[in-house]
Amino acid sequence: MNEKRSRSFYLLAAFFTAYVLFLYGPMFAIYILSFQGPDGGLTFPMNGVSLVWFGKVFSGSGIVDIAAAFRRSLQLGLVVMVLTVVLSVSAGLAFRRSFRGATFLFYVAIASLIMPSIITSLGIALEFRLLDDFVIKSGATDWTTAMGLFTSGLGAHLTWTLPFGLLIMFAIFNRFDSRLEEAARDLGATPWQTFWHVVLPIILPSVVGIGLFGFTLSWDELARSSQTIGPVNTLPLDLQGLTTTVTKPDIYALGTLTSAVSFLVIFLALVVILVLQARQRRHGSDAGKGLV
Amino acid sequence: MMQGRKTFVAWLQAAPMMVVFSVFFLLPLLLVTIVSAWDYNEYEMIPAFSLRGYSDTFEGCIADLPNLCTILKTYLKTLKLCLLTWCLTLLIGFTVAYFLAFHVRSKTWQIVLTLLCTIPFWTSNVIRMIAWIPLLGRNGLVNRGLEGVGLIRQPLEWLLFSEFSVVLALVHLFTFFMVVPIFNSMIRIDKRLIEAAYDAGATGWQTLVNVVIPLAKPGIVIGSIFVITIVMGDFVTIGVMGGQQIASAGKIIETRLNALQFPAAAANAVILLGITILIISALTRIVDVRKEL
């Protein structure tokens, strides 16, 4: 393999570089263009450099109420993150033993992952509509809708984040050394103590990873939100709405801002993961320290 | 007794996730199927059996023969976009995964380069779509550049808001879904098999076709399932990058929904679901996906 390597290696390396440029090029274009001067348009060349368009986004002049959408997306993302972590870890633990319906739950998760989003979205919208109709027919005259950010919207996002969380949990427990748990049991730890003091600290970096996935998947989620979020919008929905109406760089500024939030969250999560791993190495052995 | 208690605990631990999937995935799917066979008028859906949702969808299809009616044309167009995207993402994804798995030797570099491909995935799809506008637009970089070197006189109009830009954006967005599973299959291939192929006198191409591709097949199938289901149901990318001019299967559902014709939307969803399931089951015939996860 070695002697042949050089030529195909350089060809493939060139291909890979081209792919990376293809991935990043357009994105950098809009990051740069969001700093257009006040007279700048949607295209190159830059017409001056300024923060005008970011100001426009924040002041909310001209376009929709971004600040509110921003807050909503953030809140929803955080709730989705917490639920994804708790439910995935819990189900991940369950899958280490066999239980009735394990195969079924696995296939449902996979189906949810690959189901075209519009179908899931439509289904949830229908479900809540039928529920509303039912409540109104039952005599609640002032009832408007059960649909909302933290009911139908939350559910829609979870059908997208939970399969990812579960698959990551499978990956974690595939290489988990269960002798550590046996040792804890032998030392007289209750199942809860074993989980809290032994299992969780070991899997914590990956659990942070699940949270990170949950948040960013929800933060950027559009297709499943489209019919299920109720009367308000999340940031991606606003952004999609703007693509047809706005002809000024404020849409790029908004794009740059949402990307910045994604990157900030990922950066923070990576820092947490690294700190946790470093701590694990430092405190690798608890010998002689006792626990309670 | 102890064993029974343990399985009960496991069942309890899995229950919350099962509940979420039941309420927000299984029940909605069931409702879609049921409502697709309901009647409707301009204002509401009527819980009475009717196949109006389906018959409205295929309205005029028989009368129009041998010409294709709108709905069939739309599905063919969606399939065409799907096929193009699938071919391109597979070719690019396979090549990238092959480079990462077989040519990048150090583990660290593999991680760094994989991360490099992952980062754009963390940016909203809409942003990655609109990022093409300054490049492909009438006064975009590509047109300016081509005019600058004298290749064209008039700006090319088909660059943006066309099937070209839709496929380009889809490839841009979803190639990563091919890279990851194919890469995962490839790093599990025993390197000695490849050495053996070389020792037995196989050319690079023969090794690729007879050793690497068969062993990477599970990854190829998983990646294909991802890309195909996403593209078949997509309405956002095709909407934005097609300038809201290109009809697609997902777009029909969205339009029906916005017109509050729920049974008609549901009927279209059932059709789309049927096609998706057909494609997936054909693909899973090739490999047992469960074994690979």
Image: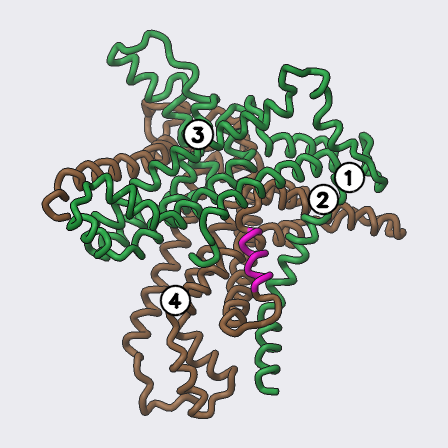
Residue behind mark 4: A205
| Residue beneath disc 1 | B37
Q: Name the foreground residue: B132 vs B66.
A: B66
The answer to whether residue A39 is visible is: no
Q: Which residues are magenta?
A: A103-112
Q: Which chain is brown?
A: A
Rate crowding at label 1 as few (under 14), some (14 to 19) or many (20 or more) other CA atoms within 10 Å: many
Asked if the residue at tag 3 contacts the one at tag 2, i.e. Cβ–Cβ closer than 8 Å, the answer is no
Q: Residue at x 72, y 16 (%)?
A: B63
Expressed as whole percent of the image width and height from the top left, the position of residue B171 reads 41, 34
User: Residue A14: where, in percent of width, then height?
Assistant: 21, 36
A118 is within the stretch colored magenta: no
User: Residue A190 appears at what percent x and percent y?
Assistant: 51, 87
Q: Is residue A272 above or below residue B49?
A: below
Going by the numbered disc 3, the residue's amino acid type is Leu
Residue B33: which numbered mark, if any? 2
Q: Chain of mark 1?
A: B
Say left or right for B293 vs B203: right
Label total for image: 4
Give whichever of A109, B240 is nearer the camera: A109
Q: Amino acid at mark 4?
A: Pro
Question: Outermost residue, top direction?
Answer: B153
